Image: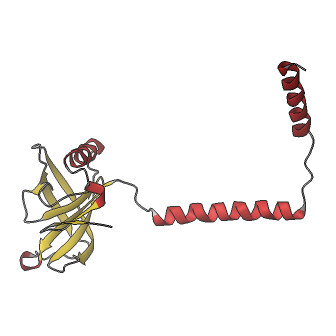
Amino acid sequence: MKWLERRQIRRREQERRSSEPRPTTEVQTDRRRSDRRQAQRRALDRRLIQRRHYFRVIYPPDEAPTVLNADYRIVDLSQNAIKFACTNGSRPHIELGNPVDARLQFRDGDIFDVRGKITRIEQSQNGDETLFVCVLDELVPQDRVNNEQRYLLKNYPHFCRVSFDRRRIVLEN
């Protein structure tokens, strides 16, 4: 028998098998239903864990944009929010819901005026700074966030694997 004939026979058998209805049992139906429910639960869990809609750039202390009109240090930046820090000694009177106007200057000289409201206030891990999260009224351009990310990944190759403390770099395990 030639290889072509064997191939044609296999195809006919496959077509015959696929056209026949498969007998399903109650166990198989229950298993499919259970698998579907588990997949839906896993999808819901993923959505609950990852709630961010915008990529966040976390800055090393020396590379963060400077705030020209206030004494803040930018900790991280996304398209719709900024986290900034103030030392506890120089903390301005900021409460939840207060408006914030900031003028950011990036390392390449670009200046952006941002406006928003304070949505969260917390202490830093070492306790010497107060962190403020400000949700912006207008989005920071996506190109700007991508440029910052590209620059940091190029100049700090361990950027995603390193935790930047204010005084030193700490490698995470």
In the drawing, does residue 110 fall left or right of residue 40? left
Looking at the image, which residue is at 24% across and 43% down?
147
Which residue is at the far front?
1
Q: How is the image coloured?
A: secondary structure
Residue 167: quarter of image = bottom left
In the drawing, does residue 75 fall left or right of residue 108? right
Q: Is residue 83 above or below residue 64?
A: below
Q: Is residue 86 above or below residue 158?
A: below
In the drawing, does residue 88 fall left or right of residue 33? left
Can you see residue 96? no
Looking at the image, which residue is at 85% across and 29% down?
11
Q: Give the number of callouts.
A: 0
Query: Which residue occupies the foreground of this view, 44 or 35?
Result: 35
Q: Which quadrant would the C terminus be assigned to in this image? A: bottom left
> x and y percent of residue 59 in the render?
20, 58
Q: Which quadrant would the N terminus be assigned to in this image? A: top right
